[in-house]
Image (cartoon, coloured by chain):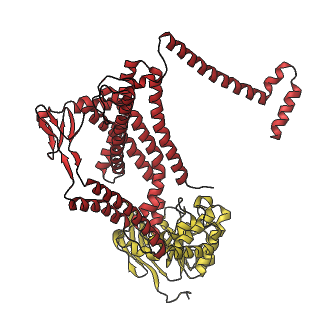
Chain colours: A yellow, B red
């Protein structure tokens, strides 16, 4: 049935609840992602999709429920966030590259200072991933000298340099001009094909159709609908999903 | 370019006669620039001529000959040795030394206080944040001269007489004559302690560089900064103890009506330092706050998601970006302190403006050279600092397309 039948669970979320003050952002979220699986999360803004993936690498702390990342239970209040973040990588909507460092330095920062890698080795690793995303010739430039699409590809390479097992994408193409979206999606497709476990918050339904094992639709803090792309697009079970799809397709 | 020529040629063909030149943009621009230049040169020539005539009428000279003449007045507080019979030139240097002393001490204090208040302003603790806000708004929004006078007449002049002094740790004395502290008295062998300090300092720098290079090579890290700091403190201390403590302290002692011995500064100095550093610290606090806030939350999240260790996040991500925003206005505050220290004249502290622009000028009547020398000093200090800062700024500027 599934192409990853029987694979280990990369992420397991059980009865996750989170509040921002009085506001209940995530309500009883259950989710299991197996290794090599690609999940796409979509939904209207404010539905909690970003918050959900930010809970996985503990950029947000949850109040109730359990999150297991690569078999490790996430402790409340971010107490073991460093352990969790060793296996996860994240790509942000706004790229968040370090503007005062070159592309190469952006990529070698954590390998040299966090992972204890000699500089020469870290640079080799960085060049490998920069080549992979197609910008090895821009390595000595500064982020703001590049286009948005190039910056986002640097961000992907930078994250890959920390050797994550799971990649989290938080609306990676939403801040890009239409002609640059494709170059980023191509990199993500290549990454998916290489066997990376990925959770992508995105509205790029073409991408979802092409690579996703499952698409989740979230609304008001709940996973309303989930299923493989075929089912999801052809016969959504809920009105809200149908409405949403009619807006973005 | 082509368009300009076209309109130019059209206007010259359309308009004929003497009025034609008025409509030619090039001719008009040259004429206006020449007119401006002539006005500026004329104004200066008139000023200089007028001054010369006036000086001649009153039998005054604009020369610097008076600098060798004995000034003949006393100065209540001098950093460099000075006696009443010394020359005017000496008075100039006494003023400069006093001004630089006030500036240096105030800059150090204002920076430390400003840093803490700025961080407190960002605190999650409601009371701490509001208190620092109140501190900033109160000090920033009242005139500095008012604050200097308030500190002088309201605090330091109202302190008890020497007999009832406030004595702290049996060494620091505060009364209405000023602030007294023990003076260090180096003895034979103290030179070795100083030498040990210099060696430790150089050693710490070398250690830092070595650690950086080794980390690049092997990836292993080592706490070079804390080790270096420990070296700088411990090595001179060990040498000091080994040589039988070749540095003693001369504490201030009450004799008759006043304290003698130690180092002392007058109340006016205390008031000036406290007022200048408190006032400027409010501005520095805001500069620090804005610098820290200028580093977007996204930068911290990226560093977090990449699992960059917190100390490296501070050193390689936050500080380089925050300092880029903080340093230029900070330097401008340092220059402000230096210039604002001239308000010392209001409470009788003998800074450059007080002893030179006021007393010396009144006594000698050499307004032109005295004003020129004073302005030259302030300009020299400010321009030197600006020069250094501009080169720093060019170096840390973020490169965009």
Residue B127's x, y, as percent?
Answer: 28, 48
Q: Nearer the viewer, residue B400 or B249?
A: B249
Name the quadrant of the C terminus of chain B. Answer: bottom right
Query: In the image, B356: left or right of B75?
Result: right
* Relative height, residue A175 to residue B382 (above, below): below
Q: Position of residue B278 (x, y in %)?
A: 32, 40
In percent of width and height, residue A120 lies at 53, 75
For this rendering, which residue is in front, B212 or A57?
B212
| Residue B127 visible within the image | yes
Q: Is residue B119 above or below residue B103?
A: below
Q: Is residue A221 visible?
A: no
Tally of numbered tags: 0
- Choose top left, top right, bottom left or bottom right for residue B276: top left
- Quadrant position of the N terminus of chain B in the picture: top right
Picture quadrant where residue A154 is located: bottom right
Give the residue drawn at x 85%, y 29%.
B11
Which residue sits at x=51%, y=12%? Answer: B56
For image coordinates 10% across by 32% down, the residue present is B256
Q: Position of residue A70 (x, y in %)?
A: 43, 81
In the picture, measured across the screen, residue A191 lies left or right of residue A51, that is right
């Amino acid at each position: 049935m599934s192409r990853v039948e029987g694979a280990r669970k990369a992420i397991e979320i059980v009865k996750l609840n989170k509040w921002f003050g009085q506001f209940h952002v995530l309500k009883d979220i259950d989710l299991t992602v197996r290794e090599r699986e690609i999940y796409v999360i979509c939904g209207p803004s404010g539905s909690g999709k970003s918050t959900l993936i930010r809970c996985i690498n503990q950029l947000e702390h949850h109040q109730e429920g359990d999150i297991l990342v690569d078999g490790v239970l996430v402790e409340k209040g971010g107490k073991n966030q460093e352990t969790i973040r060793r296996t996860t990588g994240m790509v942000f909507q706004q790229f968040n590259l370090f503007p005062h460092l070159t592309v190469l330095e952006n990529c070698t920062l954590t390998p040299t200072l966090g992972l204890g890698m000699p500089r020469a080795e870290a640079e080799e690793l960085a060049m490998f991933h920069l080549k992979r995303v197609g910008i090895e010739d821009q390595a000595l430039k500064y982020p703001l000298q590049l286009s948005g699409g190039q910056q986002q590809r640097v961000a992907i390479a930078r994250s890959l340099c920390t050797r994550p097992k799971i990649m989290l994408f938080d609306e990676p193409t939403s801040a890009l001009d239409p002609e640059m979206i494709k170059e980023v999606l191509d990199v993500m497709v290549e990454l998916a094909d290489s066997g990376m476990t990925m959770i992508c918050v995105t509205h790029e339904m073409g991408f979802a159709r092409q690579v996703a094992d499952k698409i989740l639709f979230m609304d008001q803090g709940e996973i309303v609908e989930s299923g493989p792309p075929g089912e999801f697009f052809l016969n959504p079970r809920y009105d809200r999903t149908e409405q949403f799809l009619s807006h973005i397709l | 370019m082509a368009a300009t020529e076209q309109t130019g040629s059209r206007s010259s063909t359309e308009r004929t006669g003497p009025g034609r030149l008025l409509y030619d943009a090039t001719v008009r621009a040259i004429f206006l620039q020449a007119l401006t230049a002539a006005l500026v040169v004329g104004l200066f020539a008139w000023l200089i001529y007028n001054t010369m005539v006036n000086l001649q009428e009153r039998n005054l000279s604009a020369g610097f000959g008076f600098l060798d003449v004995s000034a003949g007045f006393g100065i209540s507080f001098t950093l460099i040795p000075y006696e009443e019979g010394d020359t005017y030139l000496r008075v100039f240097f006494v003023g400069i030394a006093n001004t630089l002393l006030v500036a240096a001490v105030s800059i150090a204090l204002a920076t430390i206080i400003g840093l803490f208040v700025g961080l407190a302003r960002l605190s999650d603790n409601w009371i701490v944040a509001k208190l620092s806000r109140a501190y900033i708004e109160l000090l920033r929004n009242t005139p500095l001269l008012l604050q200097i006078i308030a500190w002088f007449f309201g605090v330091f002049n109202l302190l008890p007489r020497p007999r009832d002094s406030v004595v702290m740790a049996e060494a620091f004395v505060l009364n209405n004559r000023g602030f007294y502290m023990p003076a260090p008295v180096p003895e034979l062998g103290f030179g070795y302690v100083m030498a040990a300090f210099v060696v430790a300092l150089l050693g710490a720098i070398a250690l830092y560089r070595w650690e950086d290079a080794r980390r690049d090579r092997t990836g292993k890290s080592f706490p070079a900064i804390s080790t270096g700091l420990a070296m700088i403190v411990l090595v001179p201390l060990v040498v000091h103890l080994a040589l039988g403590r070749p540095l003693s302290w001369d504490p201030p002692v009450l004799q008759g009506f006043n304290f003698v011995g130690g180092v002392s500064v007058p109340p006016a100095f205390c008031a000036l330092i406290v007022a200048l550093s408190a006032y400027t610290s409010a501005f520095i606090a805001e500069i620090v706050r804005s610098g820290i806030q200028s580093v977007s939350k996204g930068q911290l999240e990226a560093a977090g998601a990449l699992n960059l260790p917190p100390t490296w996040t501070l050193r390689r991500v936050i500080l380089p970006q925050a300092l880029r925003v903080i340093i230029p206005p900070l330097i401008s505050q340092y220059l402000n302190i230096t210039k604002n220290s001239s308000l010392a004249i209001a409470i009788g502290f003998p800074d450059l403006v007080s002893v030179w622009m006021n007393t010396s000028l009144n006594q000698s009547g050499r307004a032109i050279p005295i004003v020129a020398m004073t302005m030259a000093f302030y300009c020299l200090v400010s321009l030197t600092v600006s020069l250094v800062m501009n080169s720093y700024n060019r170096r840390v500027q973020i490169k965009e397309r």
